[in-house]
Image: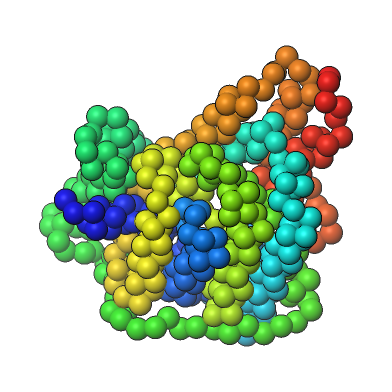
Amino acid sequence: MSKTTKNILLAIQHVFAMFGATVLVPLLTGLSTSVALFTAGVGTLIFHLVTNRKVPVFLGSSFAFIPVILAVSPMGDNGKPLDPSRLPYALGGIVIAGVMYLLLSLIVTIFGVEKVKSFFPPVVTGPMIMVIGLVLSPTAVDMAQNNWAVALIVLAVVIAVSIFAKGFFKLVPILIGIGVGYLISMVFDITGLSGANPLIFNAHSQEIMAQSKWFGLPQFMFPKFSWEAIALIAPVALVTFMEHIGDITTNGAVVKKDFLTDPGLNRTLLGDGLATVFAGMLGGPANTTYSENTGVLAVTKVYDPKILELAAVFAIAMSLFGKLGGALQTIPTPVMGGVSLILFGMIASIGMRTISEANLDFTCSRNLIIVSLILVMGLSGVILPIGNLKLAGISLAALVGVVLNKLLPENI
């Protein structure tokens, strides 16, 4: 098998990993799924260009912005915006959120990456990474419980291929797992395909495919600006700033490189910010680095950024060739649930590895307190409201960890 073919198949794995979440955000907020795929693909390429093609990440739609987008442009019971004229103002807020990322990048440049890194030693980053994986895990369970039999078969296939396969097959366990799961689902008519004749789509799949164009540019929407929408949406960037640090730290832990230093947190923030500004200018949701694709890196141990860039090109192609995106939407939820069980679990395990490799002394009360409170605050579902902002999950866990690490004496 040629290197080009291998790279294509590896990139397709990353496309499968990001697709569900990337299109779910526009479906929930009334934005265009095609535009979301287009801006995610171009945004990923922008990020890689800004970071000197050193960081193997994929940028997809950010879930953190869903509540504030809906606050500006509520959805009706029919799954469409109550007032479509409000959506451009939500996009304006997204653009300014991206600008805030650019300002944060400038602040990091002025004060230095080392100063920022001092707030995130292993006693903070280890449990933060664990929180990222464990917070995502209920999503995997929700998807899997639609049909546990299919999900567990997919999980078993991914594990078996990862451990026992040889050569190239060992690099594509997720792709193989999804393929096996899809075939099984066809037999039991879970995908929406006819079990009697797998080549004939039933009504649900026909509807998905009928609504997908063969070829054409996405229908772009351009932003409008109002102080009201900006005040609601832009401050979310302060929350996702913490998530960004957690995601980049996780990615570096998987690859065993310090991306906060090289290419630097200022560059990763700049790339994320420019990608979000670009998305908002064309009608897409805010972008963020995807833990799903970091999970793929952990499983395959192939860290070449060029693979993620190729996946970005595929995302752009799917936005132009609607039938490709439509076909991916027929993949049954439990199949993706089975894959996600191991992807999100891998992320949590990377957090444990970070703690282990740092040789943290847990007879030290300080370390116990910091780790325990990060885990509790990150996983308990507690929400800390600060004005229009709500800190929860990884954002709240990061804030608690950073504050405790600076406040608690070293030798306790």
Q: Quadrant of the C terminus?
A: top right
Foreground of the two, 12 or 357: 357
Residue placed furthest toward the left: 197
- Please name the residue shown 37% across and 68% down the image: 313
Residue 163 lies in quadrant: top left
Residue 8 lies in quadrant: bottom left
> x, y (%) of residue 347?
51, 39
Give left or right: position of 335 versus 275. left
> x, y (%) of residue 203?
27, 67
Residue 222 lies in quadrant: bottom right
Colour mode of the rendering? rainbow
- Please name the residue shown 53% across and 42% down the image: 257
> x, y (%) of residue 184?
22, 45
Give left or right: position of 409 versus 367. right
Foreground of the two, 254 or 289: 254
Give left or right: position of 356 versus 220. right
Asked if residue 90 shows in the view, the reply is no
Tally the marks: 0
**In the picture shown, does residue 74 fall above or below 282?**
above
**In the picture shown, does residue 21 fall above or below 316?**
above
- Please name the residue shown 26% across and 35% down the image: 161
Residue placed furthest toward the top: 363
> x, y (%) of residue 12?
32, 56
- Please name the residue shown 76% across and 18% down the image: 364
Asked if residue 403 shows in the view, the reply is yes
Give left or right: position of 201 versus 328. left
